[in-house]
Amino acid sequence: MPKELTLTLTPEQAARQEVYIPLAARMVGVQPGQIALARIVRRSIDARRKLQVLLTLELFIDDERPPEPVRLELRPVDHAAPVVVVGCGPAGLFAALRLIEEGYKPILVERGKEVGARKTDIAAINRNGQVDPDSNYAFGEGGAGAFSDGKLFTRSKKRGDHHRALHILLQHGADPSILYDAHPHVGTDRLPGIIARIRQTIIEAGGEVCFGQRVTDLIVKDGRCLGVICGDTTIEGRAVILATGHSADDIYMMLHRRGVPLQAKPFAMGVRVEHPQTLIDTIQYRLPSRGDHLPAATYQLVAQVGGRGVYSFCMCPGGHIVPAMTSASESVVNGMSTSGRNSLFANAGIVAEIRPADWAHLDGQHGPLAGLVLRQQFEQAAREHGGAAQIAPAQRLTDFVAGRPSSALPRTSYPPGVAPSQMEQWMPPFISEALRGGFVDFGRRMRGFLTDQAQIVGVESRTSSPVRIPRDGASLMHPAIEGLFPSGEGAGYAGGIISAAVDGDRSALATARYLKAHNNK
């Protein structure tokens, strides 16, 4: 049996295998040469008292061999029963892979472009150009995560085993460190290539991928979903997995018009806060410089302000703020980092809980879409108070907390640029007051966080879907439409790349069970 142990090391020691393997051998009472393999299981940094790296190793002694990695068992499905999968984000892609393993032909339907072509449209947005409503940071192959960081932060086992998803990413080109880092990260520069290779795997097995197809309706016969309509095009299958992502407002509206039951759900909105990365490094590591062996420092913050939760979201060390709107009428921002995390800036979403009482005034007119309408109003207000096109409203952090305007702003990583705005004047008070209290609390706990070197940029509003598409807990099927399987972030059952991938996998298994129970008819 392999032996597992945890070493407490300096950053320099943790970076050198020739140092930590002899230490590990001594701890288990063998010679270094007897260690056939030292596999890193987990790596994390502890800077609470003394800066240390905690390195957990799995040691295989002499002739012991590690277990085989998770591998896809794909079979040709060119002529198999088809299943329509709407959306080429992680939920859709991983659903397609599992369907192939189960002997079904996935037909992936994506409103946007393939991941390579998306780059051109995203570059135009970064230059403050036109926003293509179907090809942007939110829509297109790979989903919202493809060009906004690629963090793989979930370790939850509540909905499925995340190890399978991580191993599939590894097989398609991700770095092995995603299997053991405490905060695994692919990087925006690497993730598009991985996504393209996953698509190729699907196609080689006989699956289909249809780009430029925006779903406008469902095909429902005798209460059963048998495909989708994309404008003038009909795409049929034995069932439909709906994995459209958290920004597909038109899908929620189409379902609501159809009378399909939906549920409003709590979510969160706020701003992006941006600091110099060297400042965050100094605060977190308590060193004048992080040196060559430490990564760009990160943070995770949570506070309660008047009973409302305020927390950091999608923290991007060494990253950039990016324009994440899907329409020219909105100002929406997100964060991303490349694999090197070598930008001069650190940014994170700082968001406040949004509750049913906050959208109660919209319930009568909009029903389960009331939270969605509130989010749209917030994004449109930000657009009105920004600059031309994608120029975002911004304010120095200390000015926002003090309730005064900013006459000038620090440098920013946000490509289109920022314009001064006194943001609490147009934000709903329940958001601005919660954020102000949160920033004060964070400044007490991270000395130096509350500084005029930092600025907030608006708005961070796409943390999760404001709508849940209900499904039965056992079958994962919509209770009102047989054969419709809501999945991933857009359906309200995931919150990031890995959790969406796991949920897509589960939805595909549920679809296969359903079809086999009905003799694949």
Image (cartoon, rainbow, N blue to C red):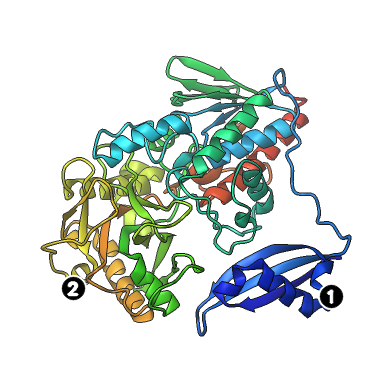
- Determine the residue positioned at 37% across, 57% down: 343
On the image, the x and y values in percent for residue 21 come to 72, 71
The quarter of the picture where the C terminus appears is top right
Question: Circle 1 — which element?
Answer: loop
Badge 2 density bin: few <14, some 14–19, many ≥20, Cα 10 Å: few
Using the rendered image of the protein, determine whether residue 234 is visible from the camera's viewpoint: yes
Say which mark, if any, is on residue 223.
none
> What amino acid is found at the position of numbered circle 1 in the picture?
Val
**Residue 132: percent from left, percent from top:** 32, 31
> Identity of the amino acid at label 2?
Ala
Taking 186 as reference, is 279 left or right?
Answer: left
Name the image quarter holding residue 137: top left
Question: Disc 2 and disc 1: Cα gap in Å?
Answer: 61 Å
As rendered, which of 141 and 499 lies closer to the eye? 141
Kindly indicate the quadrant of the structure image that contains residue 45: bottom right
Depth order, front residue of 432/203: 203
- Point out the image quarter for the N terminus: bottom right
Residue 136 falls in image quadrant: top left
Residue occupying the far bottom of the picture = 49
Find out whether the residues at labels 2 and 1 contact each other: C-beta distance under 8 Å.
no
Q: Which residue, as the protein is rendered here, is positioned at the far left?
A: 407
Mark 1 surroundings: few (<14), some (14-19) or many (≥20) residues within 10 A? some
Of the image marks 2 and 1, the number of the one nearer the N terminus: 1
- Visible residue check, residue 257: no
Relative to residue 363, is residue 89 drawn left or right?
Answer: right
Q: Position of residue 433 (x, y in %)?
A: 26, 68
The residue that disc 1 covers is 30
Q: Say which residue label 2 marks.
A: 402
Camera-nearest label, 2 or 1: 1
User: Furthest-top residue in view?
Assistant: 232
- Which residue is pictured at 34% across the width and 44% down the height? 324
